[in-house]
Image: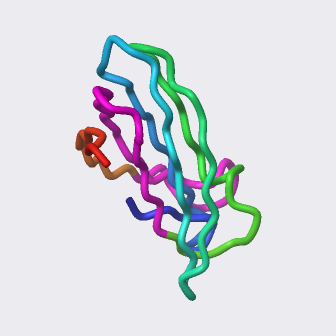
Amino acid sequence: MGAHGRPFGGYNTGCGVQNLSAIAGTLNLTYYDSIGGSTTTSSTVARNGYMGIYQGTDISSDGAYTAVITTPTAGVTLGATVNEVAPPSGAAQQSTAHRHFHMQARPA
């Protein structure tokens, strides 16, 4: 997904990830910057659980990023909605773009 860390008029990206499975799983979130550097964090998502991700607080440096969400947990399916969010103050108006997708772990 495209991840904005305040680059274009201060916009950020928010993402809601839903675990669509009856088992808990690991969610890996990897951010890639414009020169290919990456940072990965991992979290546990409860069975049928939800996790909110907000680049406005997750990314320490302003700029455009790519974020990749994966799960290594067999039998877990994740779904996500991605939104572009205007800054809390200033002249920019709320702007939203939705993308829906799902993913499953692949056997190693």
**Camera-nearest residue between 5 and 31:** 31
The answer to which quarter of the image holds residue 17 is: top left
Total marks shown come to 0
Q: Look at 56% across and 57% down and name the residue there.
A: 12
**Camera-nearest residue between 74 and 80:** 74
Q: Which residues are magenta?
A: 66-95
Residue 106: x and y, percent?
26, 45
Specify whether 62 is left or right of 65: right
Specify whether 46 is left or right of 1: right
**Camera-nearest residue between 87 and 27:** 27
Q: Look at 71% across and 50% down and name the residue there.
A: 57
Q: Look at 42% across and 64% down and name the residue there.
A: 2
For this orientation, the residue located farthest to the front is 108
Q: Is residue 16 above or below residue 63?
A: above
Residue 50: x and y, percent?
47, 23
The answer to which quarter of the image holds residue 39 is: bottom right
Residue 59: x and y, percent?
69, 60
Q: Look at 60% across and 42% down and name the residue there.
A: 42
Q: Is residue 5 above or below residue 88?
A: below
Tell me, yes or no, whether the highlighted magenta stretch contains residue 77: yes
Q: Is residue 88 above or below residue 22?
A: below
